[in-house]
Image (cartoon, rainbow, N blue to C red):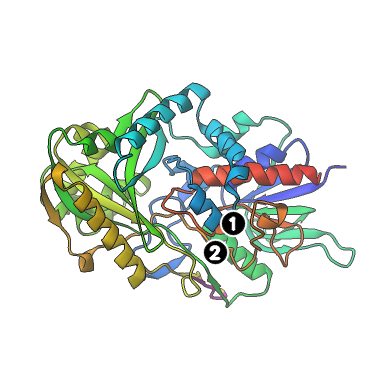
Amino acid sequence: MKKRVVVIGAGLCGSVVSTLLRNDFDVTVVEQGAKKKPLFNDVDCDTGELNTSINRAEGLGGTTNYWHNALIELDDKDLKKAGIEPRGMEPYYQKAWSFFLTPSELAECNRARDTNQAAVASGKATVAHMVLPQTRHNAWKLANERNPGNDIKVVYGQAQRIVPAANGRGGYVELAGRGGPQKLEADFVVSAGGGLGTPVLLARSLGQQEGFVPGYHDHPMAYIAKVKLKPDSKLKAISCTTTLSAEIRAGLIYETDDLKTVIYLRPAIDMRLSSISGPARYILSDLRNDPFSPKKIMMLLGNLEAVREAILFKTRLGFRGDHYSVLILGEQTPLPDRGLQMRNGKRPSLNWHVTDRELRSYSQSVDKFFAEYADDILEKKLIPVSEWEFRNAAHHSGTANQFVPMPGDTTPEFFAASKLPGTYVCDGSILRAAGIANSGLTLVALSYRLADHLRAMA
């Protein structure tokens, strides 16, 4: 008789792990709801603007219904900060790339990467090589295509507690759903509920309904300037490269006080700062997932310049022009006072504030960029640092830190919930560091790694 695995969450990690285990285990996947929709109200936030438009959703595929499949690797320094030995990660990164791209598509992207890196090799910055496939993938559908096999049972409901095996009794996951409470028996549990969902579940499972879950980090993002570039500026060439299979966006990475800042250029119509200020600056992304919101439609009508520039960016036509907005994303590290406050019977509250040290680091890195490319910039208009409007990037990370050990590499213990035997974590909450990278590719790589460990226990 096969051992039973319950995977909580059918998003990016849950889709990959469950399909990789389907032929070795009796696999059940728990997903909050059958309907594909974003989760706008599953967490409160009193500090900073919380990005509710992407990367928090339900339905098979979860957040990948909205995620744009931005693929970027953590560098060796980032991996070491995260407790991952870089050389051991290489084969799993290759599997993750192959999950999304064919060998010929990947080779094409790598040629663009090498060209961009060569363009800045003599300067102070390194390149953030981000690949966006031309086709957005639903991870559940893609994982089932990549890893076909035995049936996977899908149960809709919300996981309330994980109860490990003890005193001769088997372990189980306690669910709440439309049909009332139920128990799913399990030999192993994989929590893949995301950087906000998993820590809440683990805390509740350990009786910490009113506790604070520290260690949260993300990538605060803000528009900070507009520039007019020389017609022959190399910044245009490396900002966006379109291949047959993907779009390659190259950001410039600067490091100050052991924190990274990545700078992206996005097409603009002119030098007016109104289009990158206020709530409408991300309006097309917000409307993509909530198209009938009267509030967001009014914001759109109030800042048509932001809409016009967003369309330039989405169609990539603007990369032929001279005007650009400067967008930064910064690195955060886990802190004891940044995280989720559990509130029994109520939504948890997230604190993801940018510290003074982080702001100072981002500002100094921006200064390095303007100094290095002064000869490329004909004109610039800056938003004062004190007026930078940060929004998080929805790369919710680090919130399982207190529940899992840090053994120094991706051994089984790396994923294991210390006080919940047989329970493993595989989602953004396990990332103790993420540099300035979208975490999706790394999470797919870690999903392959965890699946290897669990298959060895089958």
Is 340 colored magenta in this rendering? yes
Is 108 colored magenta in this rendering? no
Circle count: 2
Which part of the image, by quadrant, shows the N terminus?
top right
Bin the neighbour count of mark 2 within 10 Å (Cα to Cα): few under 14, some 14-19, many 20 and up.
many
Could you say whether the residue bearing mark 2 is in a helix, strand or loop?
loop
Region rendered in magenta: 339-344
User: What is the three-letter code of the residue carrying label 2?
Assistant: Thr
Is residue 59 visible from the viewing direction of this image?
A: no
Placement of 137 over or under 89, stated as above or below: above
Q: Are marks 2 and 1 in contact (CB under 8 Å)?
A: no
Tell me what residue is drawn at x 72 percent, y 40 percent.
21
Report x, y in % for residue 80: 55, 54
User: What is the three-letter code of the residue carrying label 1?
Assistant: Gly
Report x, y in % for residue 292: 32, 49
Could you say whether the residue bearing mark 1 is in a helix, strand or loop?
loop
Residue beneath disc 2: 399
Q: Earlier in the sequence, mark 2 or mark 1?
A: 1
Which labelled disc corresponds to residue 348?
none
Residue beneath disc 1: 83
Q: CA distance from mark 2 to mark 1?
A: 15 Å
